[in-house]
Amino acid sequence: MLQKLARVFKEKAQQDLERIVKGTSKTREKLGVIEELFTYWNLEDADETLEELEDALIMSDFGPKTAFKIVDGIRDKVMSGRVKTGDQMRAELKLSIATLLRERGGSSELSLGDAQPAVLLIVGVNGGGKTTTIGKLANKFSSGGAKVVLAAGDTFRAAAAEQLEEWARRSGAEIVRADSDKTRPDTLLFQAVDSAVKSGADLVLCDTSGRLHTNWSLMDELAKCKRSISKRLPDAPHEVLLVLDGTTGLNMLNQAKEFNETVQLSGLILTKLDGTARGGAVVSVVDELGVPIKFIGVGEGIDDLQPFDADTFVDALFPEAAQQ
Ligand SMILES: Nc1nc2c(ncn2[C@@H]2O[C@H](COP(=O)(O)OP(=O)(O)O)[C@@H](O)[C@H]2O)c(=O)[nH]1
Ligand SMILES: [Mg+2]
């Protein structure tokens, strides 16, 4: 049932493009330079234009490696005569970014299989939107008829469990909270999965404390959390999702690499795309890690979570309106 629910969400992905378009403004301001390149493009100085395109992508947080790869592909098409005009170049750029997101990332569908319950571990730095995203996910699955348990694994701050409790109330999910402030997060997560197994729940969403990817002892604790979940349920967690703050820029690449080394990510969730997001950086994360974006956050409300769709995302980066 869960897998079916995950698929239904996916089909709604084309909606609400407008809000992402508004949100990716920061990246697009910088990508404005690229629009100019397309407008004044002529085949005679193709080399120079392609170099400027590469610079503009790097300026828009795409990261040097990824920018080089994208432009190299376009250069091939220019040389072989398949790209001749500015419009064709824009189309090619969009296509190559979307293709990269799909091919390097793989499927953006949650892979929950037949697990009972399916367990999702949500990780990331402080303030990225982990708890909020868990609330939104809980609501999606609950309203689809799934029995959802929230695990308050952020035992670090007292207010964290309260915040999750509020989301549990709003989404109709159950919550497992620490009964003492000495409870360790790995113990709490073990208890939550145990309780979900016993009560026949469909889905467990595990919240964790925000931590800097440079803090070794906290990263080690996160690895323990993951092992502790597996100890109770051998194939769990079925997904390890890193929440990335869409306004972060290229620093998110370092975060993602460290988290990936510690807990082997299966997907990314990009939040705050309704703000002044810098969508370019995440393309680099997908490219270098080979991990897909699975959801995007487009606001603070309970319905403001969308399944990721590569074409919609690229359309948001290069909207029609800016193409005149
Ligand atoms: N605008 C916007 N704000 C968000 C989004 N996701 C989370 N937030 C806000 O970001 C702040 C931190 O979120 P929280 O879930 O507590 O982050 P956590 O520390 O990772 O658990 C809160 O004020 C959220 O309302 C989003 O997609 N868009
Ligand atoms: Mg939190």
Image: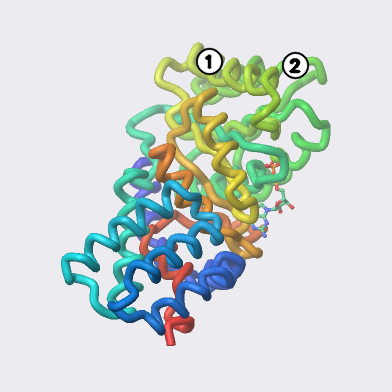
Residue 61 occupies quadrant? bottom right
- Which secondary structure lies at badge 1? helix
Please give the residue where the numbered disc 1 appears in the rendered image: 227
Could one spot residue 86 in this view of the protein? yes
| Residue 2 tag number | none
- Relative to 240, say whether 33 is above or below: below
Q: Quadrant of the N terminus?
A: top left
Question: Picture coordinates of residue 107 (x, y %)?
Answer: 33, 45
Question: Picture coordinates of residue 113 (x, y %)?
Answer: 33, 33
Dots 2, 1 in contact, CB < 8 A: no
Residue at the extreme top of the image, as rendered: 231
| Residue 183 tag number | 2
The one of 323 and 109 positioned closer to us in this rendering:
323
Earlier residue among tags 2 and 1? 2
Could one spot residue 304 in this view of the protein? no
Q: CA distance from mark 2 to mark 1?
A: 17 Å
- Which secondary structure lies at badge 2? loop
Within 10 Å of disc 2 (Cα), the crowding (few <14, some 14-19, many 20+) is some
- Relative to 263, say whether 302 is above or below: below
Q: Quadrant of the C terminus?
A: bottom left
Residue at (45% x, 23% y) in the render: 236
